Each structure stands twice: as C-alpha cells, then as structure tokens.
Amino acid sequence: ETGVTQSPTHLIKTRGQQVTLRCSSQSGHNTVSWYQQALGQGPQFIFQYYREEENGRGNFPPRFSGLQFPNYSSELNVNALELDDSALYLCASSLSGLAGTGELFFGEGSRLTVL
Amino acid sequence: SQQGEEDPQALSIQEGENATMNCSYKTSINNLQWYRQNSGRGLVHLILIRSNEREKHSGRLRVTLDTSKKSSSLLITASRAADTASYFCATSGVNNNDMRFGAGTRLTVKP
C-alpha cells in the first residue's frame, strides 16, 4: 500500500464525452504525476504538478488538463474523448526538493474504456 | 515518447534461476529507477541508482548502470513464482519533472 488513492477504479465513457479522474497523494508529498498506460505498453508521462502549478508535460494534446489542490490532491481531465484514450491512468505522488528521493509512489489506477 | 527500452520484451524462467533484464536510454539522466507491476495494477518502486553510481544491491536485486553506454541491468537472483510481473526502467533528467518509462519486460517464473 502506497497511500496513493485513485477514483474511480473503472469507468466507461463514449466518444466525445469528458472525464475527470481523481488522485489523493501520499501524506507529506508535494508533487503529483499522471501517466497513461495502454494495454501491453509502458506508462506514458502526461504531466506533473508541483505546488499547484504544471511543472512538466509530455506529448499529450491540450484536451488533457489537470489541477492540483492546496492539499496536493489532483485531478486529470480529458475532454472530447477518443477511442484511443482507453487506457489505465496512473497517478504517482512524490516529494520534490532537497528532501526528495526521486521515487514515485503509484496508485492502483483508473481504467477508462471509451466506446 | 518513451525514454527507456527494455530487453528482452518477455522472459520465462524456472523458479530458482536468475533473471536478467536490460534497459537502454537515449539522453543524459539524473537517476535511473526500476519498477515492478503486477498485471494491470499500480507500479511499485524497486530500486534507484544515481548517475554517479555503478552498482546497487537490495535484497535479491542487483542493478548496474553504465552511463557511457547509456544502459542498465536488473538482476533478480533465486527467482520465485511471486516475482512474475512486468518490470520497467524509468529515467529522469536534471529537473526530475518528467520520469519516462520503457515498454517493460514481462517476466514469468514457473514453479
């Protein structure tokens, strides 16, 4: 158990809809990263939030957006869903700064199916 | 795009044997980490090796890093059926704000 919780665990949407995924980070962590993992592939970096600001972004279109709240929890929003957005979405929390180890602590993921 | 590339893509061994997985990457790194994932669940951190380190041990795990060849290896000794999982290497640059994962090695340990 990492202390990182994600919700919902599973959801089904149709093309064109919007989805919001949520993540509660581990106590004491100030950074949240989001990843998309298609079946049989490695996790692809979407973006990272540090102190409520986007701190890095992968090769994902603007319809993928996020938020980080003062308690360091986070949301991933995806607009205009496409079939290829079907994947496991993973949230990982970490501690940035001098005390940080660089280690990511992952939640169990939210599995999104787009029909 | 993914930074690391694991090799082999799949590995099947008998319990008690050693398993070696390799990772190659393309750009300069701050550190390299190995993670494990059981079928479609969250990833679990195994070990981190910094760019100025060459070898690190943790229990039955041994990791090496060769920055001149931009490669790393993960050795699991005396494997167990419970080691069956996918193993990923991940690298981060100087800013530590974009950890990138490879496609993984799927390890099967037969009892």
Image (cartoon, rainbow, N blue to C red):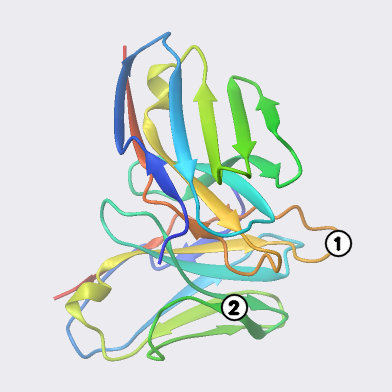
Q: Nearer the viewer, residue B76 or A82?
A: B76
Q: Chain of mark 2?
A: A
Residue at image position (66%, 60%) is A26
Which residue was labeled with disc 1?
A98
- Looking at the rendered structure, the number of numbered marks drawn on it comes to 2
Seen at 69% across and 30% down, the residue is: B56
Q: Looking at the rendering, in which quadrant would you find the N terminus of chain B?
A: bottom left
Quadrant of the rendered image containing residue A36: bottom left
As drawn, the residue found furthest toward the left would be A115
Pick the residue in front: A66 or B5.
Answer: B5
Which image quarter: residue B95?
bottom right
**Chain letter, disc 1 residue:** A
Q: Amino acid at mark 2?
A: Gly
Asked whether, in this view, residue B33 is left or right of residue A85, the answer is right
- Please identify the residue farthest to the front as the structure is shown: B68
Residue ID for mark 2: A56
The kind of residue on which mark 1 rests is Leu
Looking at the image, is mark 1 or mark 2 earlier in the sequence? 2
Q: Are marks 1 and 2 on the same chain?
A: yes
Label 1, residues with CA under 10 Å away: few <14, some 14-19, many ≥20: few
Q: Classify residue B49 by image quadrant.
A: top right
Q: Any mark on residue B108, and which? A: none
Q: Is residue B36 left or right of residue B7?
A: right
Seen at 49% across and 11% down, the residue is B78
How far across and how far down the image is residue A96, in percent? 75, 65
| Percent of width and height locating residue A63 | 37, 90
A4 above or below A114?
above
Q: Position of residue B64 (x, y in %)?
A: 61, 32
Q: Left or right: where does residue B34 sit relative to residue A115?
A: right
The vertical placement of B98 against B36, above or below, is below
